[in-house]
Amino acid sequence: MTMPFQAKHKYYQITLIFSILFSLLGFSYNVWRMEISEQNNTIRTASFEMLVELSSLEQLVYIAHYDGDLEQGSPRKGWVKVGLINDLSVLSDPSVEKSSDNLVLVWSDHWNGVGTDKTSVDNIVAAIDVVRAEIKRLLKSLE
């Protein structure tokens, strides 16, 4: 018992439409997933670089304050590190960017006291710790 030509043709068209819709859906999901993966990769790379710069900035502050070495613990080097951290924060999320902006403000208020003032050191290190905590939170939240 064979199906008439009209029925075969209709069955073929339905199969064709379903196949096209299924392939478009699969392609769309694949593009979306690749875009999310690339975005997450960019965030991870920027976050890891910021963590390295944060620890380097913290070390610079400690060298300037505890060792009294303003050559290796130069505030000019600190400005460069704070600027780089702030620039990289744009690639992350708003909470990291906000805490990084706060680090810039804290640094600008206290950079001249890193060699002599314990309160300045404490404020800068506290701001560094806030940025570090926000980065860790962001990294844990990535898909």
Image: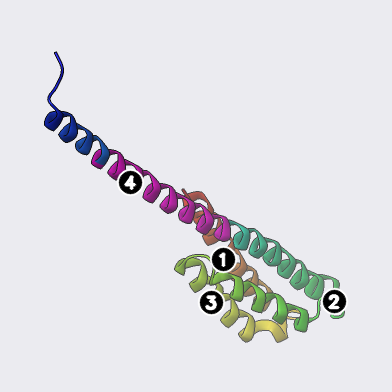
Which is more foreground, mark 3 or mark 2?
A: 3
Give the residue displayed 70% in from the left and 62% down from the top: 52
What is the CA distance from the residue labelled 1 to the residue labelled 2? 26 Å
Of residues 102 and 88, the one nearer the viewer is 88
Q: What are the residue bounds of the magenta stretch?
A: 17-43
Q: Is residue 50 left or right of residue 99?
A: right
Of residues 3 and 26, the one nearer the viewer is 3
Q: Is residue 141 left or right of residue 22?
A: right
- Residue type, mark 4 in image: Leu
Q: Which residue is under mark 3?
A: 102
Provide the secondary structure element on which disc 1 rests.
helix
Give the residue displayed 58% in from the left and 56% down from the top: 44
Residue at the extreme front of the image, as rendered: 5
x, y (%) of residue 26? 37, 43
Provide the secondary structure element on which disc 2 rests.
loop
Residue 4: name its quadrant: top left
| Labels 1 and 2 touching (C-beta < 8 A) | no
Q: Earlier in the sequence, mark 3 or mark 1?
A: 3
Q: Is residue 124 above or below residue 105?
A: above
Q: Earlier in the sequence, mark 1 or mark 4?
A: 4
